[in-house]
Image (tube, grey):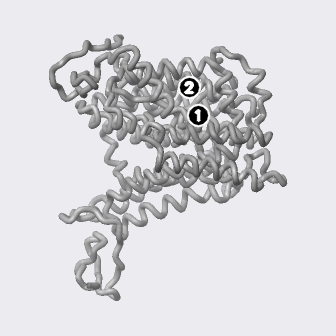
């Protein structure tokens, strides 16, 4: 095994170079200097922090609501998440043998696995979550070299639909947070004007920063909104500091904190399905980083990146956290700052490790009131759904493709809108059916194969993409034998 070392700064032009303030070119592999590395690394941490703590907060509060976890356990989830995210970021950026893409990537928990993990924990208990997380991580490590051959199963039509499903199925949780959280639900405290006002304040502040704030501040708008909401809640008596006061300043995360992992076949199957979605997401991020840094991306490099994601997921199962992938918001930081050094993100990984070893900071995050999380959740979950819409906008929407989006989305919303719908099914079936992401992902893959392969494959057109559909049937003068969505005589309606 080996770890690659920082390259020396060079002055010649290269695809892996960017200009610094003095006009000298610095390679992706170069060390930019201690001060610059610390400042820019901290910027990456700030950009990633809100997203990094969102998944443990989401899963933790959902399991508290299900009676499978105590609210005092949530700081542990946050600290463990930051610790493993830091380790995963260093491995992905620096590289360790065949693990790591060796590009500036920040790692964090993915929302793709959030609802399936809640479903598993609700039915089988918390140890079953981590058994399935470890198994899915091993699946990713083993399957990484073969994954490129299956990418054809995940065209933009499928990945856009899955992202839209993820964002949409998360919204009921955001609504519960806005109202005051699971503890307030069913009481007169749920949905009070104070809760709605706090959530609205956080959301509006995020939007104001995004619209009128400087670029560097817009990159951390969600974090600023959450911290401002926390401060606003303090004089209202909405913040409980008891767990924060009793937490330690320094402490190591305990492996297998919730007990020995349990390996339930149905739970493992559900998480492996989610792993495929996560691997598609990670592949897109790796390709995007390659474009920004002008680095060559091939199947081997993608496999190394996916293998590192799998190893991080296994480690996450050991330390009681979740599945890992690259954070897209940090890709935006790279685009804006033009600082492409992978050693900067390695420094950021070290900072995340330090934060993971300070339980006090995790306790402060866990003390954030639910309405604050609700306001931020509307923005976070909405952006996930919107990214799916953006991906779908690159597709030609014919009559068949409308079904490929509509049916999986509708199926995925069934358990989200009616959580007890599948309560009479066997436990193994509930694990799959209770997760809209699992149902929707499988349905999107199957329907895409059904409608967009063989003779059903849509014809290509020289005029680019469109998002409209045309009426079908001879009654409109638009027979559509080739199923391209434009009809055999598109001028008939003009």
Where residue 462 appears, x then y in whole percent? Answer: 18, 64
**The quarter of the displayed image where residue 337 is located:** top left
Up/down of 22 relative to 68, above or below: above
Q: Indicate which disc residue 142 carries.
A: none
Q: CA distance from mark 2 to mark 1?
A: 8 Å
Left or right: 8, with 349 as reference point: left
- Which quadrant does the N terminus fall into? top left
* Residue drawn at (47%, 42%) of the image: 218
Q: What residue sits right under mark 2 in the picture?
A: 82
Q: Secondary structure at mark 2?
A: helix
Where residue 24 appears, x then y in whole percent? Answer: 22, 21
* Residue drawn at (58%, 37%) of the image: 55
Is disc 2 in contact with disc 1, using a CB cutoff of under 8 Å?
yes
- Which quadrant does the C terminus fall into? bottom left
* Residue drawn at (51%, 59%) of the image: 409
Where residue 366 appears, x then y in whole percent? Answer: 69, 33
Up/down of 421 relative to 83, above or below: below
Mark found first going from the N terminus, 2 or 1: 1
Q: Between residues 4 and 223, which one lies in front from this camera angle?
A: 223
Up/down of 410 relative to 6, above or below: below
Q: What residue sits right under mark 1 in the picture?
A: 53
* Residue drawn at (66%, 21%) of the image: 359
Where residue 391 appears, x then y in whole percent? Answer: 38, 53
In this rendering, does residue 283 appear at all?
yes
Left or right: 239, with 143 as reference point: right
In this rendering, does residue 266 appear at all?
no
Q: Between residues 474 and 214, which one lies in front from this camera angle?
A: 214
Q: In the rendered picture of this protein, how many numbered marks are placed on residues?
A: 2
**The quarter of the displayed image where residue 129 is located:** top right
Q: Secondary structure at mark 1?
A: helix
């Amino acid at each position: 095994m080996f770890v690659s070392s920082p390259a020396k700064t060079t002055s010649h032009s290269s695809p892996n170079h960017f200009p610094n303030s003095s006009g000298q070119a610095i390679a992706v592999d170069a060390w930019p200097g201690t001060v610059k590395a610390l400042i820019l690394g901290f910027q990456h941490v700030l950009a990633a922090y809100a997203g990094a703590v969102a998944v443990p907060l989401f899963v933790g509060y959902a399991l508290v609501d299900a009676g499978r976890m105590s609210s005092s356990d949530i700081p542990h989830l946050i600290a463990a998440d930051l610790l493993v995210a830091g380790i995963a970021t260093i491995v992905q950026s620096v590289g360790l043998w065949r693990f790591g893409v060796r590009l500036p990537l920040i790692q964090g928990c993915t929302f793709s696995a959030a609802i399936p993990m809640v479903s598993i924990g609700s039915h089988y208990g918390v140890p079953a979550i981590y058994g399935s997380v470890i198994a899915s991580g091993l699946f990713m490590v083993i399957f990484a070299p073969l994954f490129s051959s299956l990418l054809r199963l995940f065209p933009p039509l499928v990945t856009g639909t899955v992202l839209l499903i993820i964002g949409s199925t998360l919204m009921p949780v955001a609504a519960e947070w806005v109202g005051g959280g699971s503890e307030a639900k069913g009481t007169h405290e749920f949905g009070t004007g104070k809760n709605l006002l706090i959530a609205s304040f956080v959301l509006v502040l995020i939007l104001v920063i995004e619209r009128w704030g400087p670029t560097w501040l817009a990159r951390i708008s969600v974090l600023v909104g959450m911290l401002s909401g926390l401060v606003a809640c303090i004089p209202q008596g909405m913040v409980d500091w008891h767990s924060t006061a009793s937490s330690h300043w320094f402490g190591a995360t305990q492996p297998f904190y919730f007990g020995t992992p349990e390996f339930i076949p149905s739970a493992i199957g559900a998480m492996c399905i989610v792993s495929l979605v996560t691997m598609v997401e990670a592949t897109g991020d790796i390709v995007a980083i390659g474009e920004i840094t002008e680095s060559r991306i091939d199947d081997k490099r993608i496999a190394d990146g996916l293998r590192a994601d799998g190893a991080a997921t296994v480690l996450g199962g050991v330390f009681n956290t979740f599945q890992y992938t690259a954070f897209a918001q940090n890709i935006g930081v790279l685009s804006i700052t033009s600082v492409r050094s992978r050693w900067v993100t390695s420094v950021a990984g070290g900072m995340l490790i330090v934060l993971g070893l300070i339980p006090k900071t995790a306790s402060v995050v866990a003390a954030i009131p639910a309405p604050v999380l609700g306001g931020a959740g509307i923005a976070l979950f909405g952006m996930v759904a919107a990214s799916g819409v953006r991906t779908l906008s690159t597709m030609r929407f014919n009559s068949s493709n409308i079904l490929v989006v509509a049916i999986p989305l509708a199926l995925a919303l069934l358990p989200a809108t009616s959580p007890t719908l599948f309560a009479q099914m066997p436990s193994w079936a509930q694990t799959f059916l209770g997760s809209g992401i699992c149902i929707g992902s499988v349905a999107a893959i199957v329907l895409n194969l059904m409608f967009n392969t063989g003779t059903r494959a849509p014809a290509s057109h020289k005029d680019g993409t469109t998002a409209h559909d045309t009426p079908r049937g001879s009654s409109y003068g638009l027979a559509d034998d080739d199923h391209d969505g434009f009809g055999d005589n598109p001028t008939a309606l003009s």
